[in-house]
Image (spheres, helix red, strand yellow):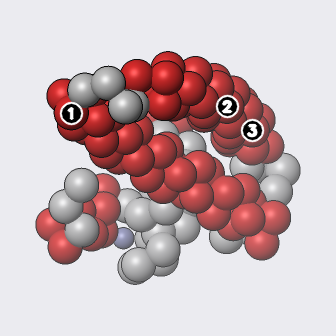
Amino acid sequence: MDTTAAQPYLEQLMNQREQLLTQMAEQRGGKVGRAEQASAHFDNSQDDSAQISTEREIEFALNEHELAELQSIEDALKRIHEGVYGLCLECGVSIAPQRLHAAPQALRCLACQSTFEKHHPT
Ligand SMILES: [Zn+2]
């Protein structure tokens, strides 16, 4: 797909990227707030520190998921500039337009995506 044909997807991807970055920035702000609260209580009780580490693990997991999503958006944007957007990363077939509309960051056709997810369970 050339860059002109990919233009609607480019706009969609830029919007998603923007939203994701805003969301991540807000969460980071929230994390600092909680960390400050946590350190205020840190010396008082063993239970609090157990609670803190659980919260941190959840936040790390969320960030990892968002970073992976951000990465796939960046990859898709790069592929638009390279003129190979919409071609499956694995087998090279054109990804169905319905799939790209639903998930413009998709890098694989449905068949390759399900194979990939079997090998990389999330
Ligand atoms: Zn494929």
Q: Is residue 97 visible?
A: no
- Which residue lies at the image location 40% right of the left edge and 79% below the top edge? 91
Report the residue marked by disc 2: 25
Which image quarter: residue 62? Answer: top left
> In terms of image quadrants, where is residue 25?
top right
Image coordinates for residue 83, horizontal then vertical, percent: 75, 68
Q: Nearer the viewer, mark 1 or mark 2?
A: 1
Which labelled disc corresponds to residue 95? none
Residue type at the position of mark 2: Ala
Rendered image: mark on residue 14: 3
Q: State how far apart marks 3 and 2 are (Cα).
A: 16 Å
At which x and y percent is residue 22?
Answer: 69, 27
Kindly identify the amino acid type of the residue bearing the numbered disc 3.
Met
Residue 67: x percent and y percent? 53, 51
Q: Residue furthest front?
A: 44
- For the residue pair 103 and 19, the one nearer the viewer reads as 19
Please give left or right for residue 3 compared with residue 65 in the image: right
Quadrant of ligand 1 in image: bottom left
The x and y percentages for residue 51 are 25, 30
The quadrant of the image that shows the N terminus is bottom right
* Distance (Cα) linking label 1 and label 2: 30 Å
Residue at which label 1 appears: 46
Q: Is residue 39 visible?
A: yes
Disc 1 marks which amino acid?
Gln
